[in-house]
Amino acid sequence: MQEHETVDKSPTIVIDKPNVKPSALDFETGIKHILGPAIIGMLLGILAEHFVTPNYAWPSPPQAAIISAVLLSPLLYFVLLSDEKSRWWEYSVGMIIPGLFFIMIWFSGWGALFCGVYLPLLIWVWISTAWGQYDLPPFRYGLWHAFAINIGGFAGAILAFSISS
């Protein structure tokens, strides 16, 4: 009598865990994922406050910064991440999801300052301290950068308004 070997053909699920970086927050993380997107958002907010807001009622400077960043997200992916070229769309989707939320929040009247600046600032600080120690997939970097661009767009608009007044 032969013994039959059973082969398990059930599908297996593989979950990619983020790789821990050698140091918790290094210089590259600080520039590419914290300061870089915030400065890009600030520049976009300054440009929107100077050129868009005087002529049009919509978009507000943070909205214009987010819309511009979403449109430029493939370029931002290659500048800020330098990851696999085929994964740029994941980064773009990561930018679009919170970006749409922020655009809708900035349309609201009284809740815009809390939900558009204060709460995203707290979340961005948390993301920057918690996610900075890992190598992440492009989608999560897109989420992280969208928060920074929103905060930077608001700060740039305030800076441009205070200088021009």
Image: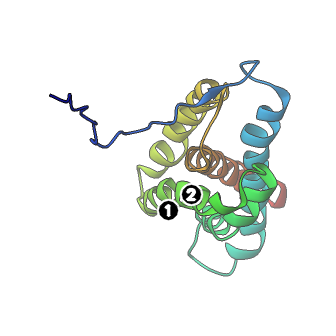
Q: Is residue 124 above or below residue 67?
A: above
* Nearer-the-camera pick, 2 or 86: 2
* Nearer-the-camera pick, 71 or 117: 71
Instruction: Kindly give the residue lying farthest to the bottom in the view shown.
Output: 55
According to the picture, the residue beneath numbered tag 1 turns out to be 103
Using the numbered discs, state the Cα–Cα distance from disc 1 to disc 2 in whole angstroms.
20 Å
Which three-letter amino acid code belongs to the residue tagged 1? Ile
Q: Secondary structure at mark 1?
A: helix
**Rendered residue at 78%/40% (across/down):** 35
Dot label at residue 57: none
Q: Is residue 37 visible?
A: yes
Q: Is residue 24 above or below residue 91?
A: above
Q: Give residue 101's quadrant in the image.
A: bottom left
Which three-letter amino acid code belongs to the residue tagged 2? Glu
Q: Position of residue 148 (x, y in %)?
A: 65, 45
- First in sequence: mark 1 vs mark 2: 2
Q: Position of residue 111 (x, y in %)?
A: 41, 49
Q: Is residue 160 visible?
A: no
**Rendered residue at 67%/72% (across/down):** 53
Q: Position of residue 25 (x, y in %)?
A: 74, 23
According to the picture, the residue beneath numbered tag 2 turns out to be 90
Total count of labels = 2
Instruction: Kindly give the residue lying farthest to the top in the view shown.
Output: 23
Query: Seen in the image, is 42 located left or right of residue 69?
Result: right
Q: Position of residue 86 (x, y in %)?
A: 66, 62
